[in-house]
Image (cartoon, rainbow, N blue to C red):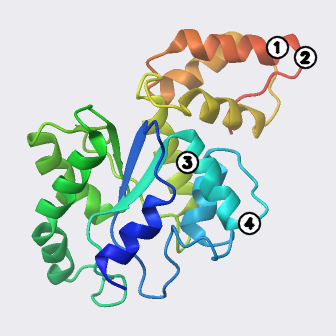
Amino acid sequence: MERSQYVALRREYEPDNLTLLIVAESPPESGLYFYNPVGRTSEPIFSAFMEQLAIKPTDKAAGLRELQRSGWLLIDATYEPIDKKFKSRDPRRDAVLLRDYPLLKKDILALSAGRQLPIMLIKENVCRLLDPPLTADGFRVLNRGRKVYLPINGNQGHFRRQFGEILVSSGGSVNGASLWLSYRLSRSRPMSGAPTRRCLAVSRSLQCNHSASCRSLITAQRSVGNLLITG
């Protein structure tokens, strides 16, 4: 597929109110493109984002519409599939991302429409290579030097934690930050003793800058007698 074909598929699911721009590496050589609506809900990257938003879609198209409604959009740093073309540490792989940086910058500017959109980078080399130039060019990169691994090959747990921590540290400015914290609370183990203090300690460990929101979530949990903390 050509770059224009990938972008055309993506455009069908671009949010009207974009609140988070996620930059990954490239479409996979396998053809399992994130925005191909006839794919499977079990595709690792797609299912990881559905989990982040606590969405259980009946099919991939439905999940993409939910992602669109959330205001999140995933774009690629390059639209040349390089996941199988080069090994992970091959410098030629990094060279492609740097070569296509002007195209990425143009893409982000067009999507931003003059706004300062929060940007999340995912995959080790994307974070390492593109955080500095994007920040230097005035974009609002949430990572701030923090890496987010791609949710494949056993890194699903790392992705879940890294993505969520950065999302919460956005200070509630990203749609879905409070939803993520609530979702993590709902999936955690029951706790006993000093509940409010310990829950707030958890929120601080996530570098949370909106403790009032965290306290309201904890209060809501307590009000139904089901207080939980993150595992």
Q: Are marks 1 and 2 in contact (CB under 8 Å)?
A: yes
Task: Identify the mark nearer the N-term, 2 or 4.
Answer: 4
Q: Position of residue 220 (x, y in %)?
A: 77, 14
Q: Secondary structure at mark 1?
A: helix
| Closest to the observer, 120 or 110 | 110
Q: Quadrant of residue 100?
A: bottom left
Q: Which mark is residue 59?
A: 4
The span from disc 2 to disc 4 (Cα, nearest Å) is 34 Å
Residue at 53% of width from left, 13% of height from top? 211
Residue at 46% of width from left, 51% of height from top? 14
Q: Which mark is residue 68?
A: 3
Residue at 46% of width from left, 31% of height from top? 174
Tell me which amino acid carries mark 2. Answer: Gly
The residue pinned by badge 2 equals: 225
Q: Quadrant of the N terminus?
A: bottom left
Tell me which amino acid carries mark 3. Answer: Gln
For residue 82, above or below residue 56: below
Residue 194 showing in the rendered view: no
Q: Quadrant of the C terminus?
A: top right
For residue 107, above or below residue 214: below
Q: Residues within 10 Å of mark 1 (few under 14, many from 20)?
A: some
Tell me which amino acid carries mark 1. Answer: Arg
The span from disc 4 to disc 3 (Cα, nearest Å) is 15 Å
The span from disc 3 to disc 1 (Cα, nearest Å) is 32 Å
| Closest to the observer, 198 or 31 | 31
The span from disc 3 to disc 2 (Cα, nearest Å) is 34 Å
